């Protein structure tokens, strides 16, 4: 998974001429055996580690935006002056180095030491985070990072605690990533930052006055500030056989372990649903040498989200790897060794995975009286209708500033970044949430990178060549570009994201004309 790079470029401990540094263009070099990226912005020169702390992406191929360096793979954002992981999905900092100026040259010195955060001016008496997932874990760490020293309780009902959920349908399910890579953090980590992590508690009631949560164990937990980040629940089809023991959904590490265990003795799998998770599961089960049939109501995989051309491309990619598609049909029933389609056909199946969508877990919030509508309604600061309660991630319906409408987004990076934004707001440092939705999806050796958010009725245009895996698929609503999917164009994806962030439509158009 990690990008392993031999040391290349100039020896920066010896130094290079400032004139060799192009403004805001990362330069890859090394010093004392470490790969380093040097960036000059005006007269300021920064030196940071060259390898992303998320999955090891090559930061020298990233983009410099306003004092940050962004990773080309999954858009993590690092502060160039400290190395801090400013924006998820990276949670750990990268090294940051002293830079010395000698005449017209710059030399990279030793690593800078990290300064402890100063205590925030606003500080809740305690923070409770309900949902130890992407949003909850990111909020927890950001609170500590910003110097919050009060009690934090992170409540979850999944062992071993927060996991790298996207990996569950990709490398871990395919057998190419060991289970050690799946937990986001160890319990030791939470002990060290003085966070109470619960991994087997389910909150069953939320009370707004007095502010408390009732847990399944009977315990009551008071909160001063509460983040709701309960995520979403996979849908189970209401058909005969949907609860048979060889039928699975995929959300948790436990689900992934069960599918892997079943795959060991299975020969044929049926995946129901041709959206991202269904297709990633299909690819991973092919990597385990199972025969895979995908059954979907859609005419083309991913068509509703990505359009026909990209849908067809993804279908052909999977077919080239041996996946068989049964489209524009649905399941009538699941039996112990086969599934029955609507048209009467049967497909042999020792293993069935349902990837037919998720529902936000909002029942607890709705019962407590929070405003909900296919998600918990929040304002631009991610605050719910009740003071002292925020919501983030898959359950939050928030105002998307570029669309002028509220959306609920099911992306890993959005959930983490919303968790980070809530942490800031809890400490009085909040700002309206302006991050551009981003997700990636992996199909064999092809990665799709999606920035923005398009309505379903978008006009779609393909620039470049899907066949050559060098393309940008452009989505326009009311004549404006609202989203772009790139294949093999990581820097373009980063640049478009930055232009969306500034709400600079002319820059988006210019970047797409290149
Ligand atoms: C297999 C898989 C692959 C994915 N791949 C990608 C990808 O490649 N790219 C991408 O952008 N997105 C991907 N996603 C989506 C992404 O994982 C989600 O958008 C993200 O996890 C949402 O984060 P969250 O914090 O809202 O919820 P979650 O991460 O689901 O966390 C919510 C947590 O709250 C807990 N919880 C819920 N209710 C309670 C309760 N009452 N009491 C206690 N605990 C509770 C849940 O058990 C869970 O641990 C994938 C999702 C799955 C399932
Ligand atoms: S490898 Fe850098 S963000 Fe994932």
Image (cartoon, grey):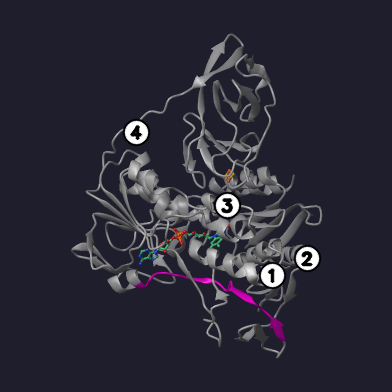
Residue with the most extreme left position: 210
Task: State which mark lies toward you, 2 or 3.
Answer: 3
Cβ–Cβ under 8 Å for marks 1 and 3 = no
Taking 466 as reference, is 62 left or right?
Answer: left
Residue with the most extreme front position: 265
Taking 193 as reference, is 12 left or right?
Answer: right
Who comes first in sequence, dot 3 or dot 4?
Answer: 4
Check the image and report above or below for 93 versus 276. above
Report if residue 362 lies within the magenta region. yes
Who comes first in sequence, dot 1 or dot 3?
Answer: 3
Tell me the residue at 66%/37% (across/down).
4
Residue with the most extreme top position: 103
Residues in magenta, as a range:
346-363
Question: How crowded is the residue under tag 4: few (<14 C-alpha within 10 Å), some, or many (20+)?
Answer: few
* Residue highlighted by disc 3: 178
Quarter of the view holding residue 192: top left
Callout 2: SS: helix
């Amino acid at each position: 998974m990690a990008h392993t790079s031999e040391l290349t470029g100039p020896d920066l401990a010896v130094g290079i001429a400032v004139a060799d540094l192009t403004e805001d263009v990362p330069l890859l070099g090394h010093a004392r055996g470490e790969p380093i990226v040097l960036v000059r912005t005006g007269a300021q020169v920064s030196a940071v580690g060259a390898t992303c702390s998320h999955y090891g992406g090559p930061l020298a191929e990233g983009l410099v935006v306003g004092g940050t360096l962004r990773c080309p793979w999954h858009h993590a954002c690092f502060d160039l002056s400290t190395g801090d992981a400013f924006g998820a999905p990276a949670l750990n900092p990268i090294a940051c180095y002293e830079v010395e100026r000698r005449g017209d040259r710059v030399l990279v010195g030793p690593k800078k030491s990290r300064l402890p955060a100063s205590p925030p001016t606003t500080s809740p008496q305690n923070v409770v985070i309900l949902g130890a997932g992407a949003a909850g874990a990111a909020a927890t760490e950001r609170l500590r990072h910003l110097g919050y020293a009060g009690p934090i309780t992170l409540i979850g009902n999944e062992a071993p605690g927060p996991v790298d959920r996207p990996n569950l349908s990709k490398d871990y399910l395919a057998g190419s990533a060991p289970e050690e890579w799946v937990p986001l953090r160890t319990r030791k980590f939470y002990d060290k930052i003085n966070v109470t992590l619960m991994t087997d508690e389910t909150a069953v009631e939320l009370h707004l006055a007095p502010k408390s949560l009732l847990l399944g164990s009977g315990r009551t937990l008071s909160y001063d500030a509460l983040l709701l980040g309960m995520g979403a629940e996979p849908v189970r089809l209401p058909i005969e056989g949907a609860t048979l023991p060889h039928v699975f959904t995929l959300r948790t590490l436990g689900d992934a372990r069960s599918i892997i265990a079943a795959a060991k003795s299975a020969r044929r799998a049926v995946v129901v649903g041709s959206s991202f998770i269904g297709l990633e599961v299909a690819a991973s089960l092919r990597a385990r040498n199972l025969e895979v049939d995908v059954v979907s109501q859609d005419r083309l995989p991913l068509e509703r989200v990505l359009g026909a051309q990209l849908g067809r491309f993804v279908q052909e990619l999977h077919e080239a790897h041996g996946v068989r598609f049964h489209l524009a049909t649905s399941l009538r029933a699941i039996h112990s060794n086969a599934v029955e389609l609507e048209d009467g056909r049967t497909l042999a199946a020792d293993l069935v995975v349902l990837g037919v969508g998720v529902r936000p877990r909002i029942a607890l919030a709705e019962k407590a009286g929070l405003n909900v509508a296919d998600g918990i309604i929040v304002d631009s600061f991610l605050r719910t209708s009740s003071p002292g309660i925020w919501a983030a991630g898959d359950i939050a319906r928030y105002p998307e500033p570029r669309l002028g409408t509220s959306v609920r987004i099911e992306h890993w990076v959005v959930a983490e970044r919303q968790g980070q934004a809530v942490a800031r707001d809890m400490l009085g440092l909040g700002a309206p949430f302006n991050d551009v939705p981003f997700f990636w999806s992996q199909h064999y050796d092809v990665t799709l990178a999606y920035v923005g958010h398009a309505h379903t009725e978008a006009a779609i245009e393909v620039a470049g060549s899907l066949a050559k895996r060098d393309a940008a698929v452009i989505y326009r609503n009311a004549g404006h570009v609202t989203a772009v999917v790139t294949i093999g164009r990581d820097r373009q994806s980063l640049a478009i994201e930055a232009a969306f962030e500034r709400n600079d439509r002319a820059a988006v158009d210019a970047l797409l004309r290149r």
